[in-house]
Image: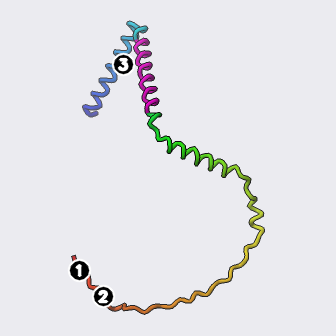
Amino acid sequence: MTIRNWLFGGIIISALIGLGTWLYSNPASLFLQLFVMILIAGIILFVIRVFMGRKQNYKESRSFAKAAKLSKKRYQQPRKSVHANKTMKRPLRKRSTAHLTVIEGKKNKKKDRAIF
């Protein structure tokens, strides 16, 4: 094990011993301290969510709601049966003859290029 692992393990073991002695000597104080810490963390989280919620882009959320509504509307329409489409034959398209010509160019001449 490296020194870092030993140090981390020592900190964890000393914290567990400290919590155990605190729980043994004064459990009410320990639970009160934990309750206060959880309460403060909850208040901070609530304040952050309230202020971050106000900064959201209104136009972006509105466009998302509109897209979701259109998508929902599109999927609620009755769909045509697949079997009905397969029974109908497609008209054969008349193939057009392509009149292509080959253009003879200067194939043997090389371009003058600068060599870097």
Q: Is residue 63 covered in magenta?
A: no
Q: Amino acid at mark 1?
A: Ala
- Tell me if 94 is positioned left or right of 109 in this view: right
> Residue visible at 58% across and 46% down?
66
Screen quadrant of the C terminus = bottom left
- Tell me if 66 is positioned left or right of 106 in this view: right
> Residue visible at 37% across and 15% down?
19
Assess disc 1: are there few (<14), some (14-19) or many (≥20) residues with their C-alpha within 10 Å of its C-alpha: few
Mark 2–mark 3 Cα distance, whole angstroms, equals 81 Å
Determine whether 83 is above or below 75 in the image: below
Pointer 2 residue:
110
Secondary structure character of the magenta stretch overall: helix
Assess disc 3: are there few (<14), some (14-19) or many (≥20) residues with their C-alpha within 10 Å of its C-alpha: few
Q: Nearer the viewer, mark 3 or mark 1?
A: 1
Task: Label 3, secondary structure: give it.
Answer: helix
Q: Is residue 37 covered in magenta?
A: yes
> Residue visible at 62% across and 50% down?
71
Number of numbered callouts drawn: 3
